[in-house]
Amino acid sequence: MVRILYDEKLLETLKRVYGCDLEKFLEAITRPTPRLYARVNILKTSPNQVIESIRSRGIDVFKDEGIPEAIYFPVEGPEKLNELDLKIYVDKRAAESIILGANLYTPGIIKCDRRVRKGSEVCIVAPNGDVIAIGIARMSCEEAITKQRGLFVEVTKSLYKAPHIIELQEYKEGLIYPQSLPAIITSKILDPKPGEVIIDMCAAPGGKTGHIVELTRGRAFIIAFDHSKTKLERMKMEMRRLGHDSLVEIWRADSRYLSMDFPWLVGKVDKILIDPPCTALGVRPKVIDEKKYEDVLNASNYQFQFLKEAVKIIKSRGVIVYSTCTVTIEENEEIIERAVKELDLEPEKIDIGIGTRGILGNYSDFYIRFHPHIHGTPGYFIAKLRKR
Ligand code: SAH
Protein backbone atom coordinates (compact mmCIF):
# COMPACT_ATOMS: atom_id res chain seq x y z
CA MET A 1 0.00 0.00 0.00
CA VAL A 2 1.07 3.56 -0.61
CA ARG A 3 2.46 5.10 2.52
CA ILE A 4 4.76 7.89 1.44
CA LEU A 5 3.24 10.64 -0.69
CA TYR A 6 6.02 13.15 -1.37
CA ASP A 7 6.01 15.45 -4.38
CA GLU A 8 8.60 15.17 -7.12
CA LYS A 9 10.77 18.02 -5.80
CA LEU A 10 10.83 16.62 -2.29
CA LEU A 11 11.91 13.23 -3.62
CA GLU A 12 14.59 15.01 -5.64
CA THR A 13 15.95 16.76 -2.56
CA LEU A 14 15.90 13.46 -0.67
CA LYS A 15 17.98 11.99 -3.50
CA ARG A 16 20.64 14.58 -2.69
CA VAL A 17 20.83 12.95 0.73
CA TYR A 18 20.37 9.29 -0.05
CA GLY A 19 21.24 8.81 -3.74
CA CYS A 20 20.57 5.22 -4.74
CA ASP A 21 19.75 4.33 -1.13
CA LEU A 22 16.60 6.48 -1.24
CA GLU A 23 14.33 3.43 -1.50
CA LYS A 24 16.01 1.90 1.54
CA PHE A 25 15.40 5.10 3.51
CA LEU A 26 11.75 5.34 2.41
CA GLU A 27 11.19 1.72 3.34
CA ALA A 28 12.89 2.09 6.75
CA ILE A 29 10.68 5.00 7.85
CA THR A 30 7.55 2.90 7.34
CA ARG A 31 8.85 0.44 9.93
CA PRO A 32 9.30 1.15 13.65
CA THR A 33 12.83 1.30 15.03
CA PRO A 34 14.04 -2.18 16.09
CA ARG A 35 14.59 -0.75 19.57
CA LEU A 36 12.20 1.41 21.56
CA TYR A 37 14.26 3.72 23.76
CA ALA A 38 13.62 5.44 27.06
CA ARG A 39 15.75 7.64 29.28
CA VAL A 40 16.18 6.80 32.94
CA ASN A 41 15.55 9.70 35.32
CA ILE A 42 18.85 9.56 37.21
CA LEU A 43 17.58 12.02 39.83
CA LYS A 44 15.15 9.35 41.06
CA THR A 45 16.76 5.99 40.28
CA SER A 46 19.53 4.18 38.42
CA PRO A 47 19.37 2.31 35.09
CA ASN A 48 20.19 -0.99 36.85
CA GLN A 49 17.36 -0.56 39.33
CA VAL A 50 14.82 0.27 36.62
CA ILE A 51 15.94 -2.64 34.46
CA GLU A 52 15.69 -5.04 37.38
CA SER A 53 12.23 -3.82 38.30
CA ILE A 54 10.86 -4.04 34.73
CA ARG A 55 12.45 -7.44 34.12
CA SER A 56 10.91 -8.80 37.33
CA ARG A 57 7.58 -8.68 35.46
CA GLY A 58 8.96 -10.71 32.56
CA ILE A 59 9.46 -7.76 30.19
CA ASP A 60 12.66 -7.68 28.12
CA VAL A 61 14.66 -4.48 28.60
CA PHE A 62 18.34 -3.71 28.09
CA LYS A 63 20.96 -1.06 28.75
CA ASP A 64 22.21 0.85 25.72
CA GLU A 65 25.83 -0.03 24.92
CA GLY A 66 27.01 3.60 24.76
CA ILE A 67 24.73 5.96 26.72
CA PRO A 68 24.51 5.02 30.41
CA GLU A 69 21.06 6.54 31.07
CA ALA A 70 19.49 5.02 27.93
CA ILE A 71 17.55 1.75 28.06
CA TYR A 72 15.66 -0.02 25.30
CA PHE A 73 12.89 -2.53 24.64
CA PRO A 74 13.30 -4.78 21.57
CA VAL A 75 10.49 -4.38 19.01
CA GLU A 76 9.18 -7.65 17.56
CA GLY A 77 7.59 -8.15 14.15
CA PRO A 78 6.29 -7.84 11.55
CA GLU A 79 3.60 -10.44 12.20
CA LYS A 80 1.29 -11.77 9.53
CA LEU A 81 -2.26 -10.49 10.12
CA ASN A 82 -5.37 -11.87 8.47
CA GLU A 83 -8.01 -9.53 7.16
CA LEU A 84 -11.31 -10.03 9.02
CA ASP A 85 -14.80 -9.22 7.94
CA LEU A 86 -15.39 -6.60 10.64
CA LYS A 87 -13.17 -3.59 10.07
CA ILE A 88 -12.48 -0.42 11.99
CA TYR A 89 -10.65 2.41 10.23
CA VAL A 90 -8.45 4.65 12.38
CA ASP A 91 -6.64 7.95 11.90
CA LYS A 92 -2.93 8.34 11.31
CA ARG A 93 -2.12 9.22 14.90
CA ALA A 94 -3.94 6.26 16.39
CA ALA A 95 -2.47 3.96 13.71
CA GLU A 96 1.08 4.92 14.63
CA SER A 97 0.69 3.57 18.16
CA ILE A 98 -1.68 0.68 17.38
CA ILE A 99 0.86 -0.67 14.88
CA LEU A 100 3.09 -1.31 17.93
CA GLY A 101 0.35 -2.98 19.97
CA ALA A 102 -1.41 -0.09 21.72
CA ASN A 103 -5.18 -0.40 22.24
CA LEU A 104 -7.68 1.67 20.25
CA TYR A 105 -9.49 4.44 22.13
CA THR A 106 -12.59 5.99 20.61
CA PRO A 107 -11.09 9.36 19.53
CA GLY A 108 -8.93 7.52 16.95
CA ILE A 109 -11.86 6.10 14.92
CA ILE A 110 -12.57 7.31 11.40
CA LYS A 111 -15.13 4.70 10.35
CA CYS A 112 -16.42 1.47 11.81
CA ASP A 113 -18.60 -1.41 10.73
CA ARG A 114 -22.10 -1.04 12.26
CA ARG A 115 -22.18 -4.78 12.95
CA VAL A 116 -19.43 -4.49 15.56
CA ARG A 117 -20.77 -5.54 18.98
CA LYS A 118 -19.17 -5.82 22.39
CA GLY A 119 -16.98 -8.95 22.16
CA SER A 120 -16.65 -8.95 18.33
CA GLU A 121 -13.29 -9.84 16.85
CA VAL A 122 -12.28 -6.97 14.57
CA CYS A 123 -9.36 -5.87 12.47
CA ILE A 124 -7.98 -2.35 12.61
CA VAL A 125 -7.13 -0.66 9.32
CA ALA A 126 -4.70 2.26 8.89
CA PRO A 127 -5.40 5.22 6.55
CA ASN A 128 -3.29 3.55 3.83
CA GLY A 129 -5.59 0.50 3.84
CA ASP A 130 -3.22 -1.88 5.66
CA VAL A 131 -4.47 -4.10 8.46
CA ILE A 132 -2.29 -3.15 11.43
CA ALA A 133 -3.94 -5.04 14.29
CA ILE A 134 -6.58 -7.52 15.40
CA GLY A 135 -8.51 -7.21 18.64
CA ILE A 136 -11.70 -7.58 20.62
CA ALA A 137 -14.23 -4.72 20.72
CA ARG A 138 -15.07 -3.62 24.25
CA MET A 139 -18.17 -1.71 23.12
CA SER A 140 -20.40 -1.64 20.05
CA CYS A 141 -19.64 0.60 17.10
CA GLU A 142 -22.78 2.60 17.93
CA GLU A 143 -21.60 3.22 21.48
CA ALA A 144 -18.03 4.05 20.44
CA ILE A 145 -19.24 6.73 18.06
CA THR A 146 -21.68 8.35 20.48
CA LYS A 147 -19.51 8.07 23.60
CA GLN A 148 -16.38 9.59 22.11
CA ARG A 149 -14.21 8.37 24.97
CA GLY A 150 -12.91 5.15 26.45
CA LEU A 151 -11.36 1.89 25.31
CA PHE A 152 -12.92 0.63 22.07
CA VAL A 153 -10.70 -2.26 20.98
CA GLU A 154 -8.33 -4.28 23.09
CA VAL A 155 -5.58 -5.25 20.67
CA THR A 156 -4.60 -8.92 20.81
CA LYS A 157 -2.19 -9.03 17.86
CA SER A 158 -0.45 -6.20 16.05
CA LEU A 159 1.92 -5.86 13.12
CA TYR A 160 4.75 -5.01 15.52
CA LYS A 161 4.96 -5.48 19.24
CA ALA A 162 6.65 -3.54 22.03
CA PRO A 163 5.77 -2.77 25.64
CA HIS A 164 3.56 0.33 26.10
CA ILE A 165 6.00 2.45 27.99
CA ILE A 166 3.37 4.88 29.27
CA GLU A 167 1.46 2.04 30.88
CA LEU A 168 4.47 0.82 32.89
CA GLN A 169 4.58 1.49 36.63
CA GLU A 170 8.09 2.93 36.20
CA TYR A 171 6.70 5.52 33.77
CA LYS A 172 3.89 6.51 36.11
CA GLU A 173 6.41 6.97 38.91
CA GLY A 174 8.50 9.30 36.74
CA LEU A 175 11.48 6.95 36.58
CA ILE A 176 11.61 6.82 32.77
CA TYR A 177 10.84 9.08 29.80
CA PRO A 178 10.25 7.59 26.32
CA GLN A 179 12.69 9.25 23.94
CA SER A 180 14.63 8.17 20.84
CA LEU A 181 18.37 7.54 21.11
CA PRO A 182 19.35 10.58 18.98
CA ALA A 183 17.07 12.79 21.12
CA ILE A 184 18.82 11.52 24.25
CA ILE A 185 22.19 12.23 22.65
CA THR A 186 21.20 15.82 21.77
CA SER A 187 21.03 17.02 25.40
CA LYS A 188 24.33 15.24 26.11
CA ILE A 189 25.97 17.14 23.25
CA LEU A 190 24.81 20.41 24.82
CA ASP A 191 26.84 19.25 27.84
CA PRO A 192 24.95 21.35 30.40
CA LYS A 193 26.76 22.09 33.68
CA PRO A 194 25.55 23.09 37.16
CA GLY A 195 25.56 26.86 37.62
CA GLU A 196 24.99 27.67 33.96
CA VAL A 197 22.12 29.66 32.46
CA ILE A 198 20.51 27.37 29.89
CA ILE A 199 17.66 28.05 27.48
CA ASP A 200 15.58 25.54 25.56
CA MET A 201 13.87 27.59 22.84
CA CYS A 202 11.41 24.94 21.60
CA ALA A 203 10.94 22.90 24.71
CA ALA A 204 7.52 21.23 24.86
CA PRO A 205 6.69 18.49 25.76
CA GLY A 206 10.02 18.64 27.54
CA GLY A 207 11.97 15.52 26.62
CA LYS A 208 15.26 17.31 26.19
CA THR A 209 14.61 19.88 28.94
CA GLY A 210 13.96 17.08 31.42
CA HIS A 211 17.24 15.47 30.46
CA ILE A 212 19.09 18.79 30.92
CA VAL A 213 17.62 19.04 34.44
CA GLU A 214 18.92 15.54 35.17
CA LEU A 215 22.38 16.12 33.67
CA THR A 216 22.83 19.24 35.83
CA ARG A 217 21.20 17.54 38.85
CA GLY A 218 18.79 20.47 38.94
CA ARG A 219 21.62 22.91 39.71
CA ALA A 220 21.48 25.06 36.57
CA PHE A 221 19.15 27.97 35.82
CA ILE A 222 17.06 26.43 33.05
CA ILE A 223 14.36 28.33 31.16
CA ALA A 224 12.16 26.30 28.83
CA PHE A 225 10.21 28.33 26.27
CA ASP A 226 7.45 27.25 23.96
CA HIS A 227 4.66 29.18 22.27
CA SER A 228 1.98 26.52 22.47
CA LYS A 229 -0.29 26.76 25.49
CA THR A 230 -1.56 23.19 25.24
CA LYS A 231 1.90 21.75 24.73
CA LEU A 232 3.18 23.70 27.73
CA GLU A 233 0.41 22.26 29.85
CA ARG A 234 1.47 18.78 28.83
CA MET A 235 5.08 19.74 29.57
CA LYS A 236 4.20 20.90 33.08
CA MET A 237 2.54 17.54 33.70
CA GLU A 238 5.63 15.71 32.43
CA MET A 239 7.94 17.76 34.66
CA ARG A 240 5.72 17.02 37.67
CA ARG A 241 5.78 13.33 36.86
CA LEU A 242 9.59 13.38 36.70
CA GLY A 243 9.80 15.47 39.89
CA HIS A 244 11.48 18.35 38.01
CA ASP A 245 8.77 20.99 38.40
CA SER A 246 10.73 23.14 40.85
CA LEU A 247 13.98 22.72 38.92
CA VAL A 248 13.01 24.41 35.66
CA GLU A 249 11.26 27.64 34.64
CA ILE A 250 8.57 27.00 32.02
CA TRP A 251 7.57 30.14 30.17
CA ARG A 252 5.28 30.77 27.24
CA ALA A 253 6.83 32.92 24.51
CA ASP A 254 7.52 33.14 20.82
CA SER A 255 11.21 32.31 20.95
CA ARG A 256 11.91 34.25 17.77
CA TYR A 257 11.65 37.43 19.85
CA LEU A 258 13.29 36.56 23.17
CA SER A 259 15.78 39.46 23.06
CA MET A 260 12.88 41.89 22.79
CA ASP A 261 10.55 40.26 25.28
CA PHE A 262 13.24 39.33 27.83
CA PRO A 263 15.96 41.99 27.31
CA TRP A 264 17.64 41.06 30.61
CA LEU A 265 18.61 37.72 29.05
CA VAL A 266 20.80 39.33 26.39
CA GLY A 267 24.44 38.29 26.83
CA LYS A 268 23.63 36.22 29.93
CA VAL A 269 23.00 32.76 28.50
CA ASP A 270 25.68 30.05 28.54
CA LYS A 271 23.94 27.38 26.48
CA ILE A 272 20.95 27.23 24.14
CA LEU A 273 19.15 24.26 22.68
CA ILE A 274 17.18 24.78 19.46
CA ASP A 275 14.97 21.83 18.57
CA PRO A 276 12.58 23.61 16.19
CA PRO A 277 9.53 22.33 14.32
CA CYS A 278 10.62 20.47 11.19
CA THR A 279 9.17 18.30 8.43
CA ALA A 280 9.78 15.25 10.68
CA LEU A 281 10.73 13.06 7.72
CA GLY A 282 12.94 10.99 10.03
CA VAL A 283 10.14 10.07 12.44
CA ARG A 284 9.04 6.44 12.26
CA PRO A 285 6.96 4.37 11.87
CA LYS A 286 4.98 6.28 9.25
CA VAL A 287 1.73 4.63 8.26
CA ILE A 288 1.06 7.44 5.84
CA ASP A 289 2.83 10.74 5.18
CA GLU A 290 1.99 13.43 2.66
CA LYS A 291 4.44 16.31 2.18
CA LYS A 292 5.62 18.79 -0.41
CA TYR A 293 8.97 20.42 -1.08
CA GLU A 294 7.32 23.70 -0.14
CA ASP A 295 6.93 22.37 3.43
CA VAL A 296 10.71 21.98 3.57
CA LEU A 297 11.31 25.56 2.44
CA ASN A 298 8.79 26.96 4.91
CA ALA A 299 10.31 24.94 7.74
CA SER A 300 13.85 26.03 6.94
CA ASN A 301 12.92 29.73 6.86
CA TYR A 302 11.26 29.35 10.23
CA GLN A 303 14.15 27.36 11.73
CA PHE A 304 16.74 29.98 10.80
CA GLN A 305 14.87 32.61 12.80
CA PHE A 306 15.57 30.74 16.05
CA LEU A 307 19.31 30.73 15.34
CA LYS A 308 19.26 34.44 14.56
CA GLU A 309 17.61 35.12 17.90
CA ALA A 310 19.80 32.70 19.85
CA VAL A 311 22.92 34.60 18.74
CA LYS A 312 21.48 37.77 20.26
CA ILE A 313 21.07 36.36 23.75
CA ILE A 314 23.99 33.93 24.05
CA LYS A 315 27.17 34.95 25.90
CA SER A 316 30.40 35.35 24.00
CA ARG A 317 31.88 31.79 23.62
CA GLY A 318 28.47 30.36 24.57
CA VAL A 319 27.25 27.13 22.95
CA ILE A 320 24.19 26.51 20.77
CA VAL A 321 23.02 23.02 19.86
CA TYR A 322 20.64 22.69 16.91
CA SER A 323 18.75 19.46 16.26
CA THR A 324 15.98 18.16 14.02
CA CYS A 325 14.18 14.87 13.46
CA THR A 326 14.26 15.39 9.72
CA VAL A 327 16.72 14.56 6.96
CA THR A 328 16.65 17.31 4.30
CA ILE A 329 19.83 19.29 3.69
CA GLU A 330 17.71 22.47 3.58
CA GLU A 331 16.65 22.05 7.23
CA ASN A 332 20.01 20.83 8.46
CA GLU A 333 23.45 21.41 6.88
CA GLU A 334 22.30 24.45 4.89
CA ILE A 335 20.83 26.13 7.98
CA ILE A 336 24.11 25.70 9.84
CA GLU A 337 26.30 26.80 6.91
CA ARG A 338 24.11 29.89 6.56
CA ALA A 339 24.34 30.58 10.30
CA VAL A 340 28.13 30.39 10.17
CA LYS A 341 28.24 32.72 7.18
CA GLU A 342 25.71 35.31 8.33
CA LEU A 343 25.81 35.15 12.12
CA ASP A 344 28.61 35.41 14.61
CA LEU A 345 28.94 31.64 15.04
CA GLU A 346 31.54 28.98 14.43
CA PRO A 347 30.88 25.24 14.20
CA GLU A 348 32.26 22.98 16.90
CA LYS A 349 33.30 19.33 16.50
CA ILE A 350 31.10 16.81 18.24
CA ASP A 351 33.00 13.92 19.77
CA ILE A 352 30.48 11.28 20.69
CA GLY A 353 31.36 8.31 18.49
CA ILE A 354 27.78 7.51 17.45
CA GLY A 355 25.94 8.20 14.18
CA THR A 356 27.73 9.51 11.12
CA ARG A 357 28.92 12.84 9.65
CA GLY A 358 26.84 15.40 7.74
CA ILE A 359 26.06 15.10 4.05
CA LEU A 360 27.81 18.11 2.57
CA GLY A 361 29.20 21.59 3.10
CA ASN A 362 32.42 22.99 4.49
CA TYR A 363 31.80 21.60 7.96
CA SER A 364 30.10 18.29 7.19
CA ASP A 365 32.33 16.36 9.57
CA PHE A 366 31.29 18.68 12.41
CA TYR A 367 27.70 17.40 12.35
CA ILE A 368 26.07 14.18 13.43
CA ARG A 369 23.45 12.44 11.37
CA PHE A 370 21.45 9.31 12.07
CA HIS A 371 20.04 7.41 9.12
CA PRO A 372 17.01 5.13 9.65
CA HIS A 373 18.17 2.34 7.32
CA ILE A 374 21.73 2.40 8.64
CA HIS A 375 21.48 3.16 12.36
CA GLY A 376 18.05 1.69 13.13
CA THR A 377 17.10 5.04 14.70
CA PRO A 378 14.81 7.80 13.50
CA GLY A 379 16.45 10.12 10.96
CA TYR A 380 18.14 12.89 12.95
CA PHE A 381 20.59 15.78 12.68
CA ILE A 382 22.62 17.49 15.42
CA ALA A 383 25.04 20.43 15.15
CA LYS A 384 26.97 22.38 17.77
CA LEU A 385 27.91 26.05 17.33
CA ARG A 386 29.89 28.52 19.40
CA LYS A 387 29.47 32.28 19.54
CA ARG A 388 32.65 33.98 18.37
N1 SAH B 1 12.36 19.76 22.34
C1 SAH B 1 11.10 19.07 22.50
C2 SAH B 1 10.34 18.89 21.19
C3 SAH B 1 10.12 20.20 20.46
S1 SAH B 1 9.03 20.08 19.08
C4 SAH B 1 11.37 17.75 23.20
O1 SAH B 1 12.49 17.26 23.18
O2 SAH B 1 10.43 17.20 23.81
C5 SAH B 1 9.02 21.75 18.58
C6 SAH B 1 8.33 22.68 19.52
O3 SAH B 1 8.53 24.02 19.05
C7 SAH B 1 6.81 22.51 19.60
O4 SAH B 1 6.44 22.22 20.93
C8 SAH B 1 6.25 23.88 19.20
O5 SAH B 1 5.13 24.29 19.95
C9 SAH B 1 7.43 24.79 19.46
N2 SAH B 1 7.45 26.06 18.70
C10 SAH B 1 7.15 26.25 17.39
N3 SAH B 1 7.29 27.56 17.06
C11 SAH B 1 7.71 28.21 18.18
C12 SAH B 1 8.02 29.56 18.47
N4 SAH B 1 7.96 30.49 17.55
N5 SAH B 1 8.41 29.85 19.73
C13 SAH B 1 8.47 28.90 20.69
N6 SAH B 1 8.18 27.61 20.47
C14 SAH B 1 7.81 27.25 19.23
Image (tube, rainbow, N blue to C red):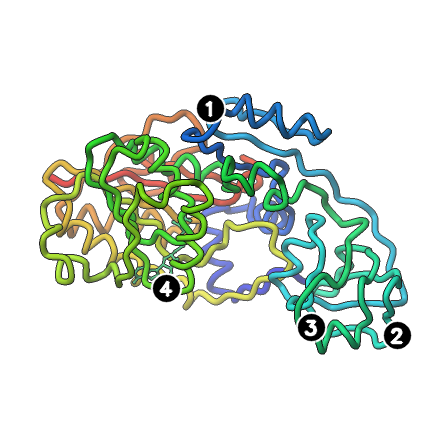
Q: Which residue is mark 3?
A: 110
Q: The disc labelled 1 sits on which kind of residue?
A: Pro
**Mark 2 sits on what residue?**
115
Quarter-wise, where is residue 88 in the image? bottom right
C-alpha span from label 1 to label 2:
51 Å
Residue 1 showing in the rendered view: no
For the residue pair 386 and 292, the one nearer the viewer reads as: 386
Q: Quadrant of ligand 1?
A: bottom left
SS at mark 2 in the image: loop
Q: Residue at x 45, y 48 (%)?
A: 238
Mark earlier in primary sequence (3, 1): 1
Separation of disc 2 and disc 3 at Cα?
A: 16 Å
Q: Where residue 114 sits: x, y (%)?
A: 84, 77
Q: Secondary structure at mark 1?
A: loop
Residue 228: numbered disc:
4
Label 2 CB-ligand 1 distance < 8 A: no
Q: Earlier in the sequence, mark 3 or mark 4?
A: 3
Check disc 1 and report the residue beneath it.
Answer: 68
Q: Specify whether tag 4 is near ligand 1 (CB below 8 Å).
A: yes
The answer to whether mark 1 and mark 2 are in CB contact below 8 A is no
Which residue type carries mark 4?
A: Ser
Q: Earlier in the sequence, mark 2 or mark 3?
A: 3
Residue in the image at 68% along x and 48% along y: 100
Q: Nearer the viewer, residue 364 or 239?
A: 239
Foreground mark, 2 or 3, reads 2
Count neighbours of disc 1 (C-alpha within 10 A) and say few if under 14, some if 14 to 19, many if 20 or more. Answer: some
Cα distance between the residues tagged 1 and 4: 32 Å
Q: As drawn, is 121 to the left or to the right of 225?
A: right
